[in-house]
Image: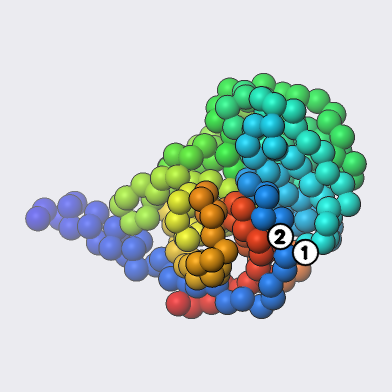
Amino acid sequence: MDRASAVSASRRQSATHRIEHLRVKVLATLPHDRRAFTQGLEMASGTLYESTGISGRSSVRAGLPGRKPNVRVALRAPLFGEGVTVLGRTLWHLTWRNRVAIERDARTLAELRRVPYPDEGWGVCLQRDRHRLVTSDGSSRLTFRDPRTLAKTGEVTVTEGTRPVTELNELECVGGAVYANVLFSDRIVRIDPATGAVTASIDASGLLHDDETVGGAVLNGIAAVPGTDQFLVTGKFWPRMFRVEFVPA
């Protein structure tokens, strides 16, 4: 092995060693609508926002965690709801393959305008300190966007060691990190958006009992609880939501 190859291998090995292995520690269990095909989850100003999918059954909701929503707005078919993120008085609500994103009033959820969105909509979160949105499309790519126009401003490929991490789905921005559900798995990854490197792999398995799962009931939904190190996590068609901490595995 030449010197350049050795240095490259050493750097890859060092990056791998920096990946934390964490698990969820359940602090509380809350009820969750088992009919909700959860696509987006976010806490803001004490309100939990949730977007649900499936054409003809999609909605966006707002209320207290574990309670019936105070406000709920349905999306007419063929719209398929996806990720949601709050920007103060407004929020962005993505759709899957409908090539449109909807800006809504954060209090009433009333539609304010629609903006073209040529990519597949999956997850979205707001990096306030960078004044940008981070979005996913089911690939290994995170795309950065202008929070007003949704125009692309950059992108990064997410890697774990040297391997790309695909199926990135629902997103949550916390400080300088981005958390992502990995579709069809019980895993959440923490990502450094500056480099795309996975800095933590979080095992969220075992939250539901076997008799609570149905077809399509996969982990998808992560919301940071403001002012704490805690998160709310749930999944598509899950009957429960969990308030958790991420602790060493």
- The residue wearing badge 2 is 32
Judging depth in this view, the residue of 235 and 107 nearest the camera is 235
Judging depth in this view, the residue of 7 and 48 nearest the camera is 48
Q: Amino acid at mark 1?
A: Gly
For marks 2 and 1, give the CA distance: 6 Å
The kind of secondary structure element at disc 2 is loop
Residue 107: % across, % down: 89, 45
Residue 29: % across, % down: 69, 72
Q: Is residue 92 left or right of residue 80?
A: right
Residue positioned most to the left:
1
Residue 98: % across, % down: 62, 24
**Quadrant where the image shows the N terminus:** bottom left
Classed neighbour count for the residue bearing mark 2: other residues with Cα under 10 Å, few (<14), some (14–19), many (≥20)? many
Labels 2 & 1 near each other (Cβ < 8 A): yes
Residue positioned most to the front:
211
Q: Earlier in the sequence, mark 2 or mark 1?
A: 2
Residue 248: % across, % down: 48, 78
> Splitting the image into 4 quarters, where does residue 166 fall?
top left
The residue positioned 15% from the left and 55% from the top of the image is 3
The kind of secondary structure element at disc 1 is loop
Judging depth in this view, the residue of 132 and 124 nearest the camera is 124
Question: Is residue 230 something one can see in this rendering?
Answer: no
The residue positioned 82% from the left and 61% from the top of the image is 67
The residue positioned 45% from the left and 77% from the top of the image is 249
The residue positioned 66% from the left and 78% from the top of the image is 27
Residue 66, which numbered label?
1
Classed neighbour count for the residue bearing mark 1: other residues with Cα under 10 Å, few (<14), some (14–19), many (≥20)? some
Q: Is residue 199 left or right of residue 42?
A: left
Q: Amino acid at mark 2?
A: His
Seen in the picture, residue 149 relative to 213 is either above or below; the reply is above
Seen in the picture, residue 52 relative to 176 is either above or below; the reply is above
